[in-house]
Amino acid sequence: MIDFKEQVAQVLAKEIDALEQAEIKNLIEIPPKSEMGDYSFPCFRLAKTYKKAPVKIADDIVAAIDKELFEKVENLNGYINFFLDKKNVVKAVAEEVEEKKDRFGGSDLGNGKKVIVEYSSPNIAKPFHIGHIRSTVIGNSIYKIYDFLGYDTVRINHLGDYGTQFGKMIVAYRKWGNEEEVRKAPIQTLLGLYVKFHEEAEEHPELEDEARETFKKLEDGCEEEYKLWEWFREESLKEFSRVYDMLGITFDSYAGESFYSDKMDRITDMMAEKGLLQESQGAEIVDLSAYDMSPALIRKKDGSTLYITRDIAAAVYRKEHYNFDKNIYVVAAQQNLHFQQWFKIIELMGFDWADQCVHIPFGLVSLDDGTMSTRKGKVVFLEDVLNRAVEKTREVMLEKNVGNENIDEVSKQVGIGAVVFQELSNNRIKDYTFSWDKVLNFDGETGPYVQYTHARACSVLRKAQAGVTTDVDYSYITTETAYELAKLILRFPQVVIDAANKYEPSVVTRHIIDVAQAFNKFYHDEHIIVENMEEQKAKLLLVDAARQTIANGLYLLGMEAPERM
Ligand code: ARG
């Protein structure tokens, strides 16, 4: 698409010899109000060089530059405001969208560079609770955004399927569990056992030792322990898959922590070779005091390895196996220190790709009654949340009497979409409280609102007599409301790039809310299905461009875009 900002920079560069064109482009702003034009160049930085007042400089530049491309160019208090030729802009936008369609906003910017996105990564035999939704949904969107920009992506679910907790689970199962119950309700039952273990261990601390020994046996490959563990894993995965199916999420690899159990010795050997390992009370640690961090425990007294050891082994494996350009971890901010520690260790081990590993943290979700803890067993299962969202959406749809023969399908798309959208609405780093009222508020800046706007656009297109074509008289869509909408669509590709650079899906979320609002204003202010066929055709083209932009945005968030609601 025509890069209008570049055009403005080019015109300015001819008159400003003190700055490079790229510098000029960087200085160009989008004015806060549309009365101030489409782009604005502040002249304040030039005052020193030219030894003139910014207003005078602006005047001189305005007088000198080639204004052919613009409707007008004005000096306002030292800012040069550029008003593009509206017809030109609307035409460029519409042609671009119609040519690219569901690829509009995407590009080959990534040039096939390999990007790993690790997300979700729940713990086996523990509930997949609403705390995990954050990593799952944010990670899925980051993956889609990178994929859309032409990166070669690999989606990894680093399952928490290893560690001392499995010692506890096995001990608890043998003492108080039975097979039938586990088969009936695997995670509920295993969670119950896990909670019981902690209650009992308060009275009988020796249980902790038993659990440690049991985990050690598992690590050493003892068959009985291994079989139980494998069974717990299998049953858990069945439950997780149900949630992933609901969310439409898939992974390229489920290589979790256990996958690295046989790759650990090599890693600890490497660390030893570099002189990084120190003995501390029989265990092995890496001292990180020089970097203002607490020491990292790498291997316990009994020889068993830890979460952090497995993360280091996993990173080395990924580099060797995938040769990534970027290795992204979408994991809660609570684990900040963990990631800082092991990124530093990787660097100290001499891996020059340490800086290609990125931790993307996010804030906590809490319920009105405090945070979630699996130890106390007070959790909300993600699957229940999603099912309830679908159920409630269905009720609202019936209440509103939305005549839809596909109500089952649509309430799924909208209910689940509502949860996903709310998750991606705020900056990821912010903590937030999960509330049903907010998630399912169908008015306001919500998923249902955006999906409904999309369905409305589809409905207009269905009802129209004319089809969508770019062979139209563009002067019909240069009114203020039409132009505002077109400009938001114009910005979409840059929004996707910004979202990728910041690893921030909410940038997309907020932008499609803006597009939806601008579309609805256009829809209410202007008659679209008018008798004048030329006018109708032009307006339909803009409707279709808005529809496509919203659909592409929803896709990047991991949501469906129903055509009827
Ligand atoms: N399983 C962990 C949890 O539920 C998250 C794993 C994050 N990924 C990682 N590579 N450490 O808290």
Image (tube, rainbow, N blue to C red):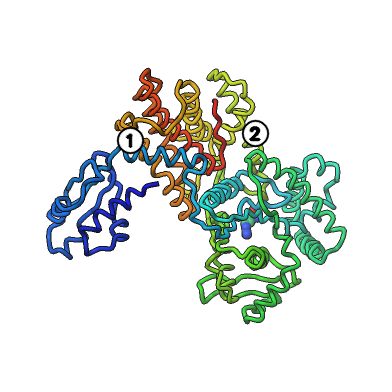
For residue 279, above or below residue 461: below
Q: Which residue is rendered at x = 36% and y = 24% of the image?
A: 534
Q: Position of residue 487 (x, y in %)?
A: 35, 40
Q: Position of residue 288 (x, y in %)?
A: 56, 74
Say if residue 485 shows up in the picture: yes
What is the secondary structure assignment of the residue under circle 2?
Answer: helix
For residue 306, above or below residue 412: below
Q: Residues within 10 Å of mark 1 (few under 14, many from 20)?
A: many
- Nearer to us: label 2 or label 1: 1
For badge 2, the amino acid type reads: Asn
> Residue 483 bears which disc, if any?
1
Ligand 1 is in which quadrant of the figure? bottom right
Q: Which residue is rendered at x = 40% and y = 21% of the image?
A: 529
Q: Quadrant of the C terminus?
A: top right
What is the secondary structure assignment of the residue under circle 1?
Answer: helix
Number of marks in picture: 2
Whole-angstrom CA distance, mark 2 to mark 1, is 41 Å
Say if residue 429 shows up in the picture: no
Q: Is mark 1 within 8 Å of ligand 1?
A: no
Would residue 438 appear left or right of 223 to someone viewing this image?
A: left
For badge 1, the amino acid type reads: Tyr
For residue 75, above or below residue 523: below
Q: Nearer the viewer, residue 160 or 456?
A: 456
Q: Which residue is rendered at x = 43% and y = 37% of the image?
A: 513
Residue at numbered disc 2: 387
Give the quarter of the image for residue 221: bottom right
Q: Which residue is rendered at x = 78% and y = 62% of the image?
A: 215
Q: Nearer the viewer, residue 370 or 166?
A: 166
> Residue 323 bears which disc, if any?
none
